[in-house]
Image: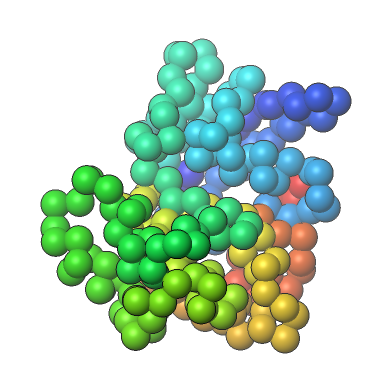
């Protein structure tokens, strides 16, 4: 279970939120732009430090202001997919996923990457560059890259914003299957009600 109780001031805006999500559950942080959704997942990922509060995954404390605990991003075991995927344009699909593994995986990297690509139907695209992929294919690469290190939680920031409207319904169904298979807490940022309906997610209003 992921537990979030944080307060963070940015300029004239103050974020003050408390919520939780169970293992295997999808929660959508839903609300207009500027309401603190992306701010929240950056705090969970360790990219920003809350002013007050706690962030815990199961029995692992990621942040606790009172106990002066603030784990570095690489210590948190959090998979993060930013809004525009952030794939390296000069690296192949395979190399993008290998890069995420670093030196932290005991298994053969090739074996791990091949299994990940096969799980999302991209085994025949591994030599392609990101510019040679469709929006949906880039999205799937970004997700398996985030999953390569076997994170305890997955964060998705507006995962359908970078694809055109006709493609979104198809992608929602594909991603729903992938996310349910992971069986870890998934936090999704969105301002589109269709994301909530299709993914059958819990809602946290922002």
Q: Check the image and report above or below for 139 versus 10.
A: below
Residues 164 and 79: in front is: 164
Residue 82 shows up from this direction: yes
Q: Residue 165 sits in which quadrant?
A: bottom right
Q: Position of residue 79 (x, y in %)?
A: 44, 51
Q: Which residue is rendered at x = 81% and y = 44% of the image?
A: 34
- The residue at 54%/73% (across/down) is 131
Q: Tell me the quarter of the picture where residue 141 sits.
A: bottom left
> Which quadrant of the view contains residue 47?
top right
Residue 94 is left or right of residue 130, and the answer is left
The answer to whether 29 is drawn above or below residue 133 in the figure is: above
Up-down relation of residue 107 to residue 16 (above or below): below
Q: Going 81% across and 24% down the picture, which residue do you hit?
A: 11
Where is residue 7 shown, x and y percent of the image? 67, 26
- Whether residue 186 is visible, yes or no, is no
Q: Is residue 7 above or below residue 94?
A: above
Q: Position of residue 26 (x, y in %)?
A: 54, 61
Q: Count the marks.
A: 0
Q: Position of residue 177 (x, y in %)?
A: 47, 77
Foreground residue among 116 and 153: 116
**Colouring style:** rainbow
Query: Would you say 116 lies left or right of 21 here?
Result: left
Of residue 111 and residue 206, the one placed in the foreground of this image is 111
80 vs 10, left or right, is left
Residue furthest front in the image: 90
């Amino acid at each position: 279970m992921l537990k979030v109780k944080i307060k963070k001031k940015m300029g004239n805006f103050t974020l003050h939120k408390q919520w939780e999500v169970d293992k295997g559950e999808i929660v959508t942080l839903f609300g207009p732009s500027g309401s603190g959704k992306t701010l929240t997942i950056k705090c969970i990922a360790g990219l920003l430090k809350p002013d007050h509060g706690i962030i815990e995954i199961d029995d692992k404390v990621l942040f606790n202001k009172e106990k002066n605990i603030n784990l570095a991003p690489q210590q948190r075991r959090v998979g993060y997919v930013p809004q525009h995927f952030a794939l390296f344009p000069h690296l192949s699909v395979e190399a993008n996923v290998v890069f995420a593994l670093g030196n932290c995986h005991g298994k053969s990297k090739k074996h791990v990457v091949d299994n990940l690509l096969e799980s999302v139907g991209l085994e025949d695209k591994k030599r392609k560059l990101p510019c040679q992929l469709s929006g949906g294919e880039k999205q799937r690469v970004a997700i398996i890259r985030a999953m390569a290190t076997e994170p305890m939680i997955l964060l998705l920031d507006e995962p359908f914003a970078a694809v055109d409207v006709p493609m979104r319904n198809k992608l929602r169904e594909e991603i729903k299957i992938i996310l349910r298979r992971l069986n870890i807490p998934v936090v999704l940022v969105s301002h589109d009600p269709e994301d909530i309906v299709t993914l059958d997610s819990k809602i946290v209003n922002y």
